[in-house]
């Protein structure tokens, strides 16, 4: 029951926010604000140390929220003939988000204590290495699922990797990918927010085939 409520909240949030943003808005939120903050306080190490966790929180929430929106909400518009496991995607992709969120909060706490002792015990280093590996693997899975979802909707069939390989790379390198992926999502979404416009899907599918 709790999971269903959480999924419902995140789905509503996704539709209202991430899926309807323009490419430049996504760029500003995810990359623009953090880069601007680092540029403005570049020579102020104290300020950078204090705002870094906050900027990472914005970056992580925006990027992962965008990918979650594609795989978790846009996937509802997949044809019935395309069997993609959205529930598995949500579980797997939540792992790196929770990990990075926890890491960000922990870093913020450490920075607030003053100078950081970098002489960690060996088991801490191994633990972080393992967690990082798991987070990266889950992130790659999530990006692949999102890319496949978007392309499958456009093609109205199950997309193969060769169909969405470029989309995978664009989502991975989001600083560039936003400018190419988000306009396609905006085009697929009905401006009334009630779903996908069949005529738009047909036009997008035709363009994709060309």
Image: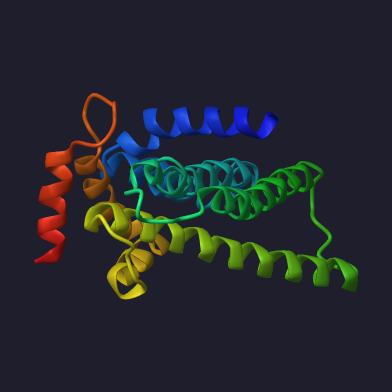
Q: Is residue 26 above or below residue 122?
A: above
Residue 173's spot in the image, x, y percent? Answer: 39, 63
Q: Is residue 123 left or right of residue 41?
A: right
Q: Is residue 144 above or below residue 16?
A: below
Nearest the camera: 105 or 14? 14
Count of marks, rendered view? 0
The structure residue drawn at horizontal position 52% and vertical position 66%, both measured from the top left corner, is 140
Q: Is residue 90 left or right of residue 194?
A: right
Q: Quadrant of residue 185?
A: top left
The structure residue drawn at horizontal position 88% and vertical position 73%, both measured from the top left corner, is 122
Nearest the camera: 1 or 81? 81
Q: Is residue 70 left or right of residue 198?
A: right
The structure residue drawn at horizontal position 55% and vertical position 61%, both measured from the top left corner, is 139
Quadrant for the C terminus, please: bottom left
Nearest the camera: 150 or 62? 150
* Image colouring: rainbow
Q: Is residue 16 above or below residue 77?
A: above
Quadrant for the N terminus, please: top right
Residue 110's spot in the image, x, y percent? Answer: 78, 48
Q: Is residue 46 left or right of residue 186?
A: right
Q: Quadrant of residue 176?
A: bottom left
Residue 146's spot in the image, x, y percent? Answer: 41, 55
Nearest the camera: 64 or 41? 64
Residue 182's spot in the image, x, y percent? Answer: 28, 48
């Amino acid at each position: 029951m709790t999971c269903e409520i959480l999924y419902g909240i995140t789905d509503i949030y996704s539709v209202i926010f991430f899926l309807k943003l323009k490419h430049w808005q996504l760029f500003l939120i995810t990359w623009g604000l953090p880069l601007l903050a680092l540029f403005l306080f570049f020579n102020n190490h104290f300020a950078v140390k204090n705002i870094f966790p906050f900027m990472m929180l914005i970056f992580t929430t925006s990027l992962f929220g965008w990918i979650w929106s594609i795989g978790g909400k846009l996937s509802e518009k997949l044809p019935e003939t395309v069997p993609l496991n959205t529930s598995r995607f949500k579980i797997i992709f939540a792992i790196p988000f929770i990990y990075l969120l926890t890491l960000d909060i922990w870093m913020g706490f450490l920075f607030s204590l003053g100078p950081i002792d970098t002489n960690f015990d060996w088991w801490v280093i191994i633990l972080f290495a393992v967690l990082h590996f798991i987070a990266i693997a889950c992130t790659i899975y999530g990006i692949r699922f999102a890319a496949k979802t978007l392309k499958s909707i456009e093609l109205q069939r199950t997309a193969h990797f060769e169909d969405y390989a470029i989309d995978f790379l664009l989502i991975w390198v989001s600083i560039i990918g936003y400018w190419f992926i988000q306009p396609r999502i905006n085009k697929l979404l009905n401006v009334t927010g009630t779903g996908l416009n069949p005529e738009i899907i047909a036009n997008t599918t035709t363009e994709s085939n060309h």
